Amino acid sequence: MNKYIAIFLLLFCFYSIRAQINIRVVNENSKYLPYAHISSLDNSKFFIANENGEFYIKDDILKKTFIVTHIGYISDTVSGQDIIQHRQIVLKEAFVEIPSVEVVASKKKKITKTFGNKSVIFNSRFICPNGKEIAVRIPGQTNHSYLRSAMFFIDKEGIPNSPFGLRVYSVDLKTNKPGNLLINKDVILAAKQGNEWVKYEFKKPLEIPKSGLFITMEWLPNSERYLEEKTGRGDVTIVANGQVLKATISIKNKWKNKVYTRWFPTKEWTKVYKTIPAIKCEVIQYK
């Protein structure tokens, strides 16, 4: 009896390995595109490529159609059958016209301000699996206000040098949620040792709309060396990326309608209450 069970388990494991198919997302020059998003049109399947542009699928996607997106590239729609047949997805680069930035008279006074959560509490944190994105709204300013930098406080706990993504969105005026992307390239960051603010300075000035904008952190599907089992809410063990984003506490609804999260780009943004991520930015103003 034990012999038959062993044979069954061996065949099951062999089938599981065979069923997993390695797919890579590349550009027209065969350069891999890390962290591309692949989602089925019916929202039942979703994948994110890892830092090598790879993701793994099973042959149950044959009858589905997928949309593949990557910042700076033209989105493409491909069938599951084509994905399995070719073992790769090729995206064409998008040539985006960057709007000109108004030059401010040098006589105006230049002021740098910090917006967001400046203080950090050490008994609260954000531990998330692949694909989660959390957004903090930066309020709109007077004319001639520009986003200079964005910062994230990454804890020394876990694997702090795990890469994560930075995105900037406009504000959807109908819902007050994140709207369209305002930067057309991937920004990937990582802490060195943890217990530090990880800072990204924008090379070109990004004018802040009067309605404000959202800065987000995205937990990326990195290779196994960056993954770690963690205990989440309710003592539930989850496999999450190694980086831990610290938090602050909102006071008197100060952050009402200003913090949202979603699990994948195919999902809806939902509000976050009480615990607020330690994300802040520097804004240049001319007065």
Image (tube, rainbow, N blue to C red):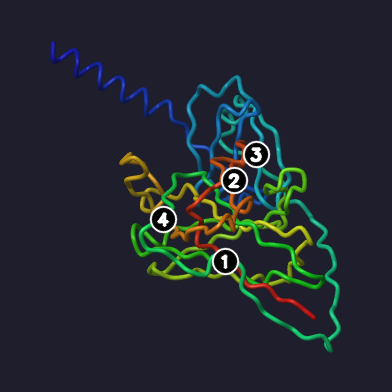
Q: Residues within 10 Å of mark 1 (few under 14, many from 20)?
A: many
Q: Which mark is residue 68?
A: 3
Q: Secondary structure at mark 1?
A: strand
Q: How far apart, in angstroms, are the residues tagged by discs 3 and 4?
A: 31 Å
Q: Is residue 73 left or right of residue 61?
A: right
Rate crowding at label 2 as few (under 14), some (14 to 19) or many (20 or more) other CA atoms within 10 Å: many
- The image position of residue 161, as x and y in percent, is 41, 62
- Residue that numbered label 1 is attached to: 280
Q: Residue at x 40, y 47 (%)?
A: 240
Query: Given this view, does label 1 or label 3 mark the residue nearer the observer?
Result: 1
Residue pointed to by mark 2:
36
Q: CA distance from mark 4 to mark 2?
A: 27 Å
Check if mark 1's residue and mark 4's residue have beta carbons within 8 Å: no
Q: Position of residue 138 (x, y in %)?
A: 66, 61
- Local secondary structure at mark 4: strand
Instruction: Work out how far the residue at label 1 is from the one at label 4, CA to CA, in angstroms.
Output: 16 Å
Q: Is residue 207 left or right of residue 190?
A: right
